[in-house]
Image: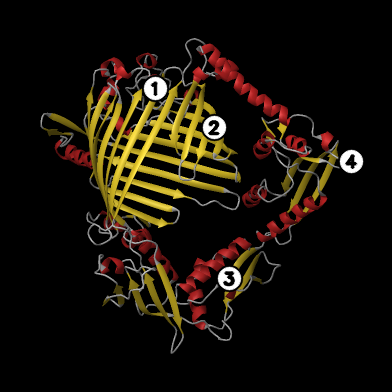
Amino acid sequence: MTEKPLQSYYLFSILLLAGAILLTTSCSSKKFLGEGESLVRGTEISVEGADKDPYLRDLKNEMRNIPHPRPNSRIFWFIPRERSYFRIQQKQDTTGWDRFILRNFAETPTLKDSFKIDRAAGAFERYFRTKGYYNAKVDYEVKVREHRAFIKYKVEPRRLYKADSLVFKTDDREVLKILNAHRGESNFQRGTPLSRENYDAEARRITRLLRNSGYYEFYPNYISNLRLGDTTRTHISVSLEISPPLPDSIHRKYTIRNIDVYPDHDPFERTAPQFQSTENGITYHFRNEPEIKTSRIKNNIFFRTGDLYNMDDYNRTIRRLGSLSWFRFPSILTHPDTTGGYYLDYDIFLRPNSRFERFTNFEFSYSRVQNITSLLGFTFSNSLENRNVFGGSERLVIDFEAGIETALRSLSTGNTFNLRIGGDLTSPQFRDYTGMFGLANNIRIGNFRLLSDDFYEDIRSEGNINVNVNAGISQYQQFYNYTFLNASYGISLQRSPTQFYDIRMLGINYWSPRELSDFDELVGDDVLFRRRFTKRLLTGFLFKELTYRYDGRPNRFGESWSVLANLEFSGHEIGIINSVSKLISGDRLIDQVKLGRDTISFAKYIRFDLDGRFHKAYSPSRKLALRGFAGAAIPLSSSTNIPYIKQFFGGGAYGIRAWQLRELGPGGLIDTLAGERNILFYQSGDIRLEFNAEYRFDLIWALEGATFIDIGNVWNISSDADPVTRLSWDFYRQLAIGAGFGLRFNFDFFVARFDFAYKVKTPYRDPKTDSYWAMRSLSDLGFNNMTLNFAIGYPF
């Protein structure tokens, strides 16, 4: 089959599928309605005062998530989804195609239902009352025209009840003393709304406060509902009463009496422990010779005999013991005893992991760049993990990786390959070897510490030391190759279930590139790129890198957020030394070092990137995924530039998918010869902006579908860069746009992804059409204009 018929075949297939869907979903919905029935075609919600009050405006936005009659959504913005539902429901027998349409394109019709309309008004009214508008009133009106119903809800919030002061009432003097001592932490400060949300937060605060003060058996049900004072005042005094645990008259504090630890527990083994020792009030019971230091266990238990019960210490102990690589999930049994007092006995069961674990992984990748080239890749990785290397639950991972990628149409251009070997040692016992964490805790900026007391305490108690070393070599066809050696020291901290920090206090990276036969032909007279492509030493002796990750949990509306931020410095200490030296003597001390015959320059820059993601699940089978990315690498002096390996790049299976990896940018640059040479692209930039949106839906069995759009580019900021590649005020003209569809095979343990992308808008004007728009007609949807990406896992 020739290229032209092949292109026409794919275009015809796409049009045929679209036509089938249109035929299936088209025809008027009115003919399916009975007498007196109407379809909801519009729903409007107005809240009095929302245009002036930010609090009311937020409540109005949240109301959209409260169930209420709303119009059916549409396919292609003009075909209501309920039409196909009506048509298929009239059939006696449904086909597989019908079920496919029902599952992915149809919606149950939203008919005018007086009961549901009235129920929604009641839900709106109750919602406002829970937010502090106790006298809120909701009215509605329904207008019907030709079987079309339009509903308008009108919310009159009336007065917002706000707190003046909070009073605690209880006959338990000790409890009252604790609550009054922490009154300033209350959620009912003067001016705060008297809402259900604030009440629930206050109940959680009180419960946590008292359980951290020894009250093991205190629960939220002992807290009364909010009691209001004089409601005629602008701000209202409120009170909460703490009930006693009947038949007792006061709540009791519990003291920890015994702590027994079973470090080699096996639930299937009935053999009694053979070894026993007691240290610092903790008794250890071993069935066999101890394989782990008891001091390491002790340092991760945050309570001692004689202490009052503390819920946070209990939870932190479970979390820290569970993070030790030598153990599986810990189990703590609590035994209250009220004989002669109020005591707690703890039994801590720790089940050991296997000492060694081996992991082997194979990955394939394939990408087709329009009609230019096809790339086939294969990666093999193997790692060996020792979970208790020094007897203190230290984890050592030795890993090896090898990969190769080849251009299928021209094997003579050479292959791309990489080899890497590395070691990663993690110790669960924090030590501030450089003293930088303690120093940061003592440095004040105004009224704030550079490292807060709470954060510093979390690092000391829950931080893990990490040392990482890796080295390798990579070659990119006949363009270039490079060797690298990286070493770093820092800490990692899981501060909460959703927040993770990785802080590299010390880091050294050596990068040594070498030009190959095609290098001059490709780069030509690009002097800036040649300067970036030199041997570099990337250093951080006081601080190297900070990585922060937030993974939010889905809320009740199926929405979740995640953020990944990274801040990296290199050579800032060198810059400080040179600045001081130049100030004193007029000379710079250090700019480069000699290693044999080589001269290696210090890289001096600051690099920051932010990756934000949002997911919305409309149903188990339909989801929306959004991602925004912004990154910048800035030299710390006018005489330096960003090393090539630290620049940003666009394109690829995890970026703007219509462009091959490193094909896009910088700015409006176009390499007209890259396709002819049939080699990999090398473009990069100092700035990267990107936005991606993807709508995912189930098809059949393990097959999922997706439609997506990608927008973005990379730019240079160096003054000696080509003007067309530099970021300017009209950068939006150079935003590339790609769109397409994807097929994903979701096998739970992994996802195989095929994405078919088209260039919609290029960052430069096409010399032939003098237009930025690459997608100008349906004929541009041919196979030859498509970029095919294959990868493992979702793109974001």
> Are the residues tagged 3 and 2 within 8 Å (C-beta)?
no
Q: Earlier in the sequence, mark 4 or mark 1?
A: 4
> Are the residues tagged 1 and 3 within 8 Å (C-beta)?
no
- Residue 499: percent from left, percent from top: 43, 53
* Residue at mark 3 to residue at mark 2: CA–CA distance: 52 Å
On screen, residue 126 versus residue 396, left or right, reads: right
- Residue 759: percent from left, percent from top: 50, 22
In this view of the protein, which residue sits in the foreground, 789 or 97? Answer: 97
Amino acid type at circle 4 is Glu
> Are the residues tagged 1 and 2 within 8 Å (C-beta)?
no
* Residue at mark 4 to residue at mark 1: CA–CA distance: 65 Å
* Residue at mark 1 to residue at mark 2: CA–CA distance: 27 Å
* Residue at mark 4 to residue at mark 3: CA–CA distance: 58 Å
* Residue at mark 1 to residue at mark 3: CA–CA distance: 61 Å
> Are the residues tagged 4 and 2 within 8 Å (C-beta)?
no
Q: Earlier in the sequence, mark 4 or mark 2?
A: 4
Amino acid type at circle 1 is Thr
* Secondary structure under the numbered disc 1 in the rendered image: helix
* Secondary structure under the numbered disc 3 in the rendered image: strand
Amino acid type at circle 3 is Leu
Q: Which residue is mark 1?
A: 725
Q: Which residue is mark 3?
A: 166
On screen, residue 512 versus residue 99, left or right, reads: left
